[in-house]
Amino acid sequence: MSKVKTIEIVFENSESVLLDADQFEWFHLSCTEHTVSGRGYYINKSLWTNNVGFLLKENNQEPDNYNLEGEKLGSWLDDSSLFGRMKYGDITQFHITYDNDETEVYFVDEYEEPSRYGGPNKNQRYEELDGKLKVTIGNEPEE
């Protein structure tokens, strides 16, 4: 059995934040389906989830958020801290890396924006609990 080393959370506009497993008080992700598709050399297995929940232990005022060009982002938010970025509600993927350096990518299924102009996923919720941030996507996960 492999132990989780890091969890990279990818947001809608290709930003991401890489967190060590010990930054989570608890984490739950249930794989709801997988597909194998493609052509020739590009046949891939995709994992999907609509049942994710986690509790982050503490806020990071200057998280390492990056876009595809490697630039730090978050200045466009009123609150560019880790919690502030999570509260924007646009998580689309989780890249989970284990202690054997294998990585699994889970896509968030049923990503539903409130309008055609984008915005937070209507299926993602958050709440602050005693200085910690609880994030839920889809169904309420077990702690």
Image (cartoon, rainbow, N blue to C red):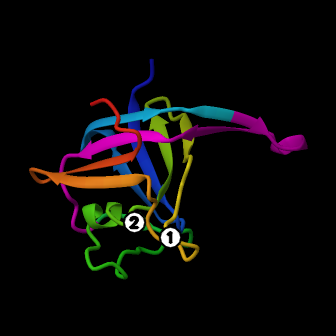
Instruction: Say which residue label 2 marks.
Output: 65
Badge 1 amino acid: Gly
Badge 2 amino acid: Asn
48 inside magenta stretch: yes
Marks 1 & 2, CB-CB < 8 Å contact:
no
Disc 1 and disc 2: Cα gap in Å? 9 Å
Instruction: Say which residue label 1 marks.
Output: 70
Residue at the far left in the pictured view: 130
Dot 1 alpha-carbon crowd within 10 angstroms: few under 14, some 14 to 19, many 20 or more? few
Residue 12 at what x, y percent from top left? 52, 64
Depth check: 23 or 54 in front? Answer: 54
Depth check: 1 or 35 in front? Answer: 35
Which quarter of the figure has residue 60? Answer: bottom left
Q: Residue at x 50, y 70 (%)?
A: 70
Dot 2 alpha-carbon crowd within 10 angstroms: few under 14, some 14 to 19, many 20 or more? many
Residue 114 at what x, y percent from top left? 49, 67
Left or right: where 107 falls relative to 43: left
Residue 141 at what x, y percent from top left? 35, 34
Q: Which residues are magenta?
A: 35-62
Q: Residue at x 22, y 54 (%)?
A: 127
Q: Compared with residue 15, is residue 9 higher up or lower down, i.e. above or below?
A: above
